[in-house]
Amino acid sequence: MKALEVNNFSKDNFETFSLKGEFKTLEAIQFKELLLNKISSNDAKNICIELNEVEEMDITALNSLIIGKRRTNKKGNIFKVKATKDHVINKLLNITRFDKYLIPEV
């Protein structure tokens, strides 16, 4: 079991979160809190979540991304997710039918 590592930095007008390890229940809840705090802060920007180094994720993790997207869009900003075509998020999005709402970039 690899704990979730979160690297947060600003790049190209995006607040970027690069995730590595297992993105599941407890880690997802903690990440959602971090993400929502950043989105609600006065210096909130566009958000980019990089998932290429996430080995496992579950529906709780997907939920944190969906909520983050809603909140970011509500503020008029962009929310994007980056992942390879064969990444587990694509399977989760397809199963849950959120693939029309959240489309990862390669």
Image: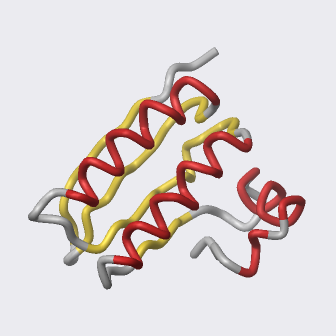
Query: On the picture, is 77 further left or further right than 66?
Result: left
Quarter occupied by residue 84: bottom right
- Classify residue 56 as left or right of residue 76: right
Camera-side residue of 82 and 31? 31
Q: Residue furthest left?
A: 42
Q: Is residue 45 left or right of residue 24?
A: left
Instruction: Tell me where residue 73 appears, x and y as whole percent.
Output: 41, 78
26 over 28 or under it: above or below: above
Q: Residue furthest bottom?
A: 76
Question: Farthest right residue?
Answer: 95
At x 62%, y 50%, the residue is 63
Snapshot quadrant of residue 24: top right
Residue 66 sits in quarter: bottom right
Quarter of the picture containing the C terminus is bottom right
Task: Please say if 47 is above or below 105.
Answer: above
**Number of numbered tags placed on the structure image:** 0
At 52% from the left edge and 66% from the top edge, which residue is drawn?
Answer: 81
The x and y percentages for residue 80 are 47, 72
Residue drawn where x is 50% and y is 33% of the image: 29
Q: Position of residue 94 (x, y in %)?
A: 85, 66
The colour mode here is secondary structure
Residue appearing at x 64%, y 15% in the figure? 1
Picture coordinates of residue 31 (x, y %)?
42, 38
